[in-house]
Structures are given as C-alpha cells and as structure tokens.
Amino acid sequence: MSIQEYEWIECESRNISSYCGHKVNIPVTIRNIEKEKRTFRIELTLEFKQADPSIIWEMDFTNNDRGIIQFSPEGDREFERKIELDGHAVREMMFTIDSPKGGSIDDSATVRIRIASEDGIHSANFTDLIMLKPVIIAVKTNVGKELEVATNLINSDEKDMEERSVLNPAAKKEILAIMSPYELRGYFYLETMHPDRIPYIGRSMRNFKGVVEGAINIEEIKEQLTPKPAVSGLELGSFIELVKGPFKGEKARIMNIDHEKEEVTVQFIESAMLIPVKVKAEDIRVIESGKKQ
C-alpha cells in the first residue's frame, strides 16, 4: 500500500476464525484528503464455501437505510454503496457480519471489499476470510453437580440428534467435547459449533443453570485442562475428610505425603483407630490447611 493510499483509507485484510452466531466487525475509515467534495464507491462481494448452500449470512452497515442485508450461495452476493465527503472530511464505517447459526465446521465466507473515488484518484482492495470453527463455552450448574449435568447433556444431545435425523439424515451431535476440571466448581467447559442450541438441549434439566455468554479462548484455561498430581497443594498437618473408600466420611490429619505413589498417610481424629492409614490422595478433601496450624 502506498503512502497516499495509507493517508486516505484505513482497512486491512484478515483471516478471521468465527463461530456460529458470532458477529464479525470489519471497520473502514475513509478520508477525503482533497479540498473539494468527492464521491467514493464501496463494493462488497462475498464468496462462500459451506456444506449447506441455503444457509444465510447477514450483514449490517453503519447508517445503512436498507437494514439487514442477507447473503448466501443461492441468493445475493454483492453490495454497493456511494458516500459523499466534503473536503478533508472523514467517514468511519463498520460492516458487521453475523456468522450463521446453522453453519458447519470450516464453512467460510470470503469478503472482498473495493473502495474507490469516482474521480479515479484513489482505489484500494481488501479481503477478509471468515471461517467457522468450534467454540468453547462455560456451562453453569449447581455446585457439586458438574459431572451429573455433563452426563445428562451428553445423553440429551444424543436424543436430540436422533430426533433431528428424521428430517435431516446428516444431523450431527451438538456437543463435540466436555471438559470438567476438578477444581472448577459450578461450571464446566463445553465445545460446540452451535452455542445457541445448548440451552435448548439442557432445557428443564435438573441442576442445569444455562450457559455463560461469550467464547472462551483455550489459552485462558490451558492450565486447568492439564491434569495435576492428586497430591498437588497438599500439606502436612492439614485436616481432611475421606470422600471415597471404606473410611468415607471420616476426618483425619495428614501425617505423610508420598508424591511418587500419590498417597497420603492420615491419622483419624474422631475414631478409636489410632494406627496411621495410607489412602489415595484423590480420595480426600482438605477441610483446613496445614498452614493454619
């Protein structure tokens, strides 16, 4: 791009990963760097690659009197607009494209933008590739019911797919993966192409509290998805409760920690049994940290 072009326009070509139902913003700023009033022509052309050609993409445009414009492989693919700018005037615009809720993995729309002054002095071309990818969302549950809700959602998703396959043999499950970190209470992560359908699948489900709006970047939760040793964070002298095994419900104090075997030796504090017992670290819950002793 020349210096002259940089002076009169701000826009960029991008490769954008989106998800179904997500809004993609394409900002454009045009400057009339001449003294006289001038007219600029904006042309958009969309090209599609998608499994279902009837799926519609929608676009809104700043100060667009046409309202929402629909595009699809089987319908309109072009948009044109003229704007007039006084000398040295600046116009900031925003093209907002709604990724279709019914899209499939790797469906894409290539948005080609050409902007040119009608006096022939300035022109520029930009291309945005919008590709649909799965998204990670957070599902809300009652505390302690994360695995129960996750299991019920998977079963409900299976039933939902069977019902949809009557009319659409190519119907697929909505839930691609579920991730429920042990330390995350009242929430778990779910990967899907269609986040808007998860509340429907979980409707009327006991302990299901809906979904958190917005997407989650996997980089933000990477540490939670890496399994940690069961003894991680345990301290000598901590008070614990047995949550599994033959001593379930008993309270004890940690006397020794075996990091290699991921076991702890505990001394019961509310039992006649005085002999230390080895239990798996995953079978205990810390009541009070040893630091407080």
Image (cartoon, helix red, strand yellow):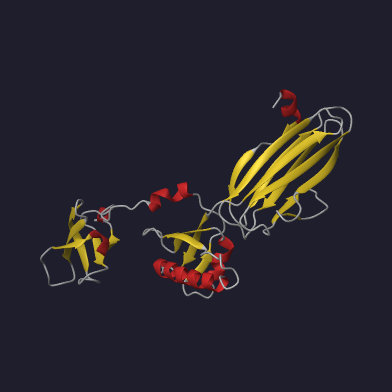
* Residue 265 % position (x, y): 16, 59
* Residue 29 % position (x, y): 74, 37
Looking at this view, name the residue that lies furthest to the front: 169
Placement of 269 over or under 281, stated as above or below = below
* Residue 267 % position (x, y): 16, 63
Looking at this view, name the residue that lies furthest to the right: 36
**Toward the viewer: 194 or 202?**
194
Placement of 128 over or under 60, stated as above or below = above
Looking at this view, name the residue that lies furthest to the top: 3
Placement of 178 over or under 85, stated as above or below = below
Quarter of the view holding residue 195 = bottom right
Visible in this render: residue 62?
Answer: no
Which residue is pictured at 58% across the width and 53% down the height?
19
Placement of the N terminus among the 4 image quadrants: top right
Which residue is pictured at 60% across the width and 48% down the height?
131
* Residue 40 % position (x, y): 83, 36
Which residue is pictured at 67% across the width and 46% down the height?
25
Quarter of the view holding residue 88 = top right
Quarter of the view holding residue 240 = bottom left
In the drawing, does residue 114 fall left or right of residue 167? right
